Structures are given as C-alpha cells and as structure tokens.
Image (cartoon, rainbow, N blue to C red):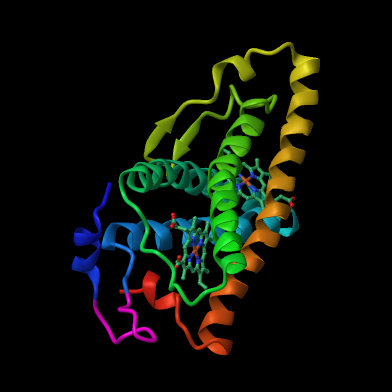
Amino acid sequence: MTTPAELTQHQTGSPHHGEPLIRYSRTAMILHWLIAAGILGNVALGLSADSLPDDWIRPVIDTHKSIGITVLGLVLLRILWRVAHRPPPLPRAFPAWERASADAAHLLLYVLMIGLPLSGWLHDSAWKDAATHPMTLFHLVPWPRIGFVMNLEPAYKEHMHDVLGAVHTWFGYVLYAVLALHIGGALKHELIDRESVLRRMLP
Ligand code: HEM
Ligand code: HEM
C-alpha cells in the first residue's frame, strides 16, 4: 500500500483550489496510455476488418490478435500495480456521486480490459481452422490457443465460436458506452468545471 507520505512525492504543479495536484505515478501513466492506445487501435482494426480487401484481412486480424494479447499482459501488470498502490484521491470538492461514478466506471473498465482480450482469445481458440493457422505474436513469439476449447467436439465448437464472437462484440458495445462516460467525464472536469483531472494522468 502506498502511504500518504509516498503520494506526496508525486506532488507537482499548481494548487488545485487550495489542494495540491497529486498525479498518478509514472508506472501508472505509462500503463494507462499504452493500454488505451492498444485498445483503441484494436477497436479500429476489429471494426474495419470486414470491409478491407481480402488479402488485407488476415494480416489485420493477426495484428489485432497480437495487440490484444499484449494488452492482456499489460493489464495484468496494471492490476498488480493497482493492488499495491492507492490511486491519488480525487479532489474533495467533487460531489460524492461524481466520485462514485468514476470509481464504478474504472471498475467496469478493468472488467472490460480483461474481458475483451480473453473473449477474443477464447473465440479464436474455437475457430475450426485454428490448428492449421498457429498464432505468432507480431510474427515473432509463438503463442498458444486455449487447449480445452480447441479440443471441443466440432459441431459444439462451431456453436461456441459464434457465442464467444458475440460476447466479444458485446464487450465492445459496453466499452464504447463506458469510454464515452470516462472521456466525457475527463473533458467535463477539463472544460466546464476547470478542475483538471487529465493532468493527474499526464506527465
Ligand atoms: C484489446 C483487446 C481487444 C479489443 C478491444 C478487441 C475488439 C474487437 C472489436 C471491436 C471487434 C469487432 C467486433 C464487431 O464486429 O463489432 C473485434 C473482432 C475480432 N477480434 Fe478482437 N479485440 C481484442 C482482442 C482480441 C484478441 C486477443 C483476439 C484473439 C486472440 C481477438 C480476435 C478477434 C477476432 C477473430 C475478431 C473478428 C474479426 C472479423 O472477422 O470480423 N480480439 N475485436
Ligand atoms: C481504452 C481506453 C481507456 C481505458 C481502458 C482507461 C481506463 C482507466 C482506468 C481503469 C482508470 C482508473 C485507474 C485507477 O485509479 O485504477 C483510468 C484513469 C484515468 N483515465 Fe483512462 N482509460 C482509457 C482512455 C482514456 C482516455 C482517452 C482519456 C483521456 C480523455 C483518459 C483519461 C483518464 C484520466 C484523466 C484518468 C485519471 C482519473 C483520476 O484522476 O482519477 N482515459 N483510466
């Protein structure tokens, strides 16, 4: 656990309506922005895959899978960071409902950060051609499929391929809604309240 004394090491910048601006640690910022870039990039690749020329689809999906597994690893690191550190408290001036909504959105984002890559990996492991198309992250690192899914009985596996694909897509829909609140909230504090929270996540 980070003690208040350690948190003050990150204090910089101008006062925040009398309260000092306390930033997230460098590790938390790096992980936040790497994961955000990976997820947003993967949404773009996932949504565009079907409308691309045929010979683009495979490389784009392979890149999507490589980024997704990388995000999963970064999220596990981030969760380790999170259980060992208390995030800087939000300004006391924020109403309780805003602090509670931010906490709820963050919790849901953690569920989605795990749920999206995991459902994608499960979906892909149920693909009938998985065995003949081994996964290699960024053409460099051989990566396994999930064995018990690959070994399902073929008809049932095809059914699970559809179900898991739908779960993956639906996690995407929930992500768009929560991200709208997350980004909208950050912009509200930035532009309307003029009490920046964005600077807590920026070096
Ligand atoms: C950061 C994690 C990930 C995000 C945000 C993400 C997001 C998405 C989105 C938004 C789609 C399009 C769904 C739609 O049609 O509306 C998609 C499709 C897909 N994703 Fe992911 N994904 C992630 C990780 C993965 C992983 C790790 C795998 C496999 C190992 C994977 C495999 C697939 C496949 C096979 C499709 C279907 C593409 C198609 O044929 O249209 N995804 N993903
Ligand atoms: C896929 C994209 C994103 C994900 C998954 C994500 C996730 C998260 C999570 C889980 C936290 C809480 C960290 C904690 O205390 O444990 C957080 C904090 C934060 N995020 Fe994001 N984020 C994303 C994109 C963005 C974007 C685009 C912005 C810019 C508008 C942003 C701005 C912030 C800020 C300012 C904080 C700090 C909030 C505070 O001061 O308490 N995030 N993010």
Residue 149 pos. (x, y %): 63, 19
Image height of 169 relative to 39, above or below: above
Q: Position of 41 compared to 6: left or right?
A: right
Numbered-mark total: 0
Quadrant occupied by the C terminus: bottom left
Q: Nearer the viewer, residue 153 or 117?
A: 117
Q: Which residue is drawn at 44% across and 76% down?
A: 198
Image height of 12 relative to 101, above or below: below
Q: Residue at x 70, y 53 (%)?
A: 174
Residue 130 pos. (x, y %): 61, 26
Q: Residue at x 59, y 40 (%)?
A: 115
The part of the image, by quadrant, that contains residue 88 is bottom left
- Is residue 106 within the magenta segment? no
Q: Residue at x 54, y 75 (%)?
A: 186
Image height of 37 relative to 110, above or below: below
Secondary structure predominantly adopted by residues drawn in magenta = loop
Q: Nearer the viewer, residue 57 or 14?
A: 14
Q: Which of 108 and 145 is in front in this view?
A: 108
The part of the image, by quadrant, that contains residue 143 is top left
Q: Position of 19 compared to 158: left or right?
A: left
Q: Position of 53 compared to 179: left or right?
A: right
Residue 179 pos. (x, y %): 62, 63
Q: Which of 28 and 71 is in front in this view?
A: 28
Residue 156 pos. (x, y %): 78, 17
Report the span colored magenta.
12-21
